[in-house]
Amino acid sequence: MLRAFTARLADIFGPGTGQYVNSDGVLTYGKLPRPKLENPFRVMMRPTAMNYLYFLVGWAAWTMDGYDFHSVSLSLSRLAEYYDKPRESIATSITLTLLFRPIGAVLFGFAGDMYGRKWPMIANLILISGLQLATAYCYTFKSFLIVRAMFGIGMGGIWGNAASMGLENMPVDCRGVFSGILQQGYALGYLIAALMNLYVVPKVEMTFRALFYIGAALTFLVAFARLFFPESQQFLEKKAAAALLPPTTAMQKVQAFKSQVQKMLKKYWRRCLYATFLLGIFNAMSHTSQDLYPTYMQQTKLFSPESSSLATIIAKCGALLGGTFAGYYSQAFGRRATIMIASFFGAIFIPLWVLPSSWGALVAGAFVIQFCVQGAWGIIPIHLNELAPRGFRASFPGITYQLGNMLASPMAQIASVVSENWKIWVTVDGEREERPDYGRTQAVMMAVIFTLTIIWTAAGPEKRGVEFEEPEVGEGEKGEILPTFSCSSDASSGDGASSGDHGAVVLDGKEVAVPMMDDLKREIGPGGALELENISRKLP
């Protein structure tokens, strides 16, 4: 067991094995040289103008998704006063939004894979803009809950299409840093909402409704801007390839896609489950550390709404930096290794997040925690896109993300209920007063979540650098040309037993050197051929 454990750590923190071009210019299989970190400014200059257009549209959509979601958490106390309900009841709306997000991920994710990234995203943005506006006109608590549940459907569709469109067109060696920047669009959305909550809401008669009006307008603006940008290049190439096949009706296309989904689930069901639980843990990490933070600062630490909003803004600056830095370093050190390191340091800094009483120390703790939380999160967009089966890069990341969200949906409400019943005595104007202990609740929950993140990340796969344009070995659909393979040992004895340490695989006419493991030797035999389905299991 110890040997397996050390081997696993070596796989995660080492450079790994795979195909690479050696110093002699030969395509070789073996221990990969660790990628060197490039100057980040040089990396930022590599994408073309069109690459940036695709990326910026996805980033803007995800930014507004973050703004629209956090409008409720930033207004929790005001909404509780308006509807005359306890804060934990208002937090139910956050749970409902999260629970309904998988529906949107399925609807808009499959639409993105079937009909392209452009029009499903436009329809999606218009839907959440309308529901954000409707939230401002909810005069009863029941209608508020219904609208926020429907908002979850709209919100659930954005991430998959935004991430796939933003990253699938990026050069391979730029993916890490742009993954971090893309994911921090969510933190930027929170930051914009917090600024509006700090400087606009207190100065207008409509108070908290102003947040929803602004969000609806900005989200619609992104949808309008999307009209003027082209369809994703990846989808256009897929559409051009499909045009070479015999014509099919719309129903036949739907049936064919349904068949592809069934085949994908049959082959990759373990990967789907792994990604879903991974995103469940990640969403628990973000919602536990973010959703009730303003309430924690106000109710437990006794700061004003304005001071709490300013603390949130500074914490989100840490998130923006963490996601970008971690995404950049994951390109060299690996996706899993970087996630695990960020989670480890996050756990270490939990005391700084909850123990101090001064505003400055608490804000410093929030900055570091969000740097670590969103540092780990910054790797998720590209990690999921690299794990996604070919042809499902809008639906696989989006659906697993939102199913994970559904698993984590009760976290804000659990934290609220536990905190409201877990009391702490504080001094207010010279008087001792009992207050909800949000700090202790968040500390315990985040310690558990960081630990689970490290363990579950280590247990999973990684496909850093996989080519989005190429099918996986042994994978293909009707109308696609699969690579051809042949394989032989490079030395054999007269009795038919292979004696070489390496073999050669011919991939589309190119010979690739591979280590000859014992079981692979037995299957090939001296000079024998290896079946395609067998070799697909042996080679990465």
Image (cartoon, rainbow, N blue to C red):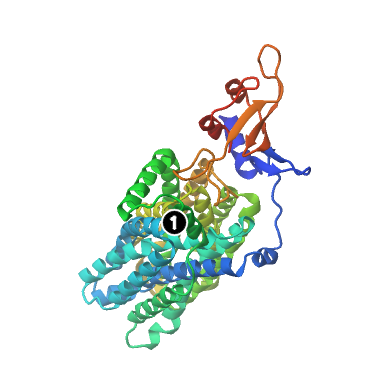
The residue singled out by tag 1 in the image is 394
Q: Position of residue 63 (x, y in %)?
A: 46, 70
Q: Nearer the viewer, residue 258 or 321?
A: 258
Q: Position of residue 205 (x, y in %)?
A: 33, 88
For badge 1, the amino acid type reads Ala
Q: Nearer the viewer, residue 309 or 129?
A: 129
Residue 99, image quadrant: bottom left
Q: Is 429 above or below relative to 31?
A: below
Let me know if residue 444 appears in the view: no
Residue 91, image quadrant: bottom left
Q: Residue at x 46, y 71 (%)?
A: 189
Q: Residue furthest right?
A: 24
Q: Is 398 above or below relative to 494?
A: below
Quadrant location, the N terminus: top right
Q: Position of residue 486 (x, y in %)?
A: 61, 31
Q: Residue furthest top?
A: 495
Q: Does residue 450 appear to the left or right of 125 in the view shown?
A: right
CA neighbours of label 1 inside 10 A, class few (<14), some (14 to 19), many (20+): many
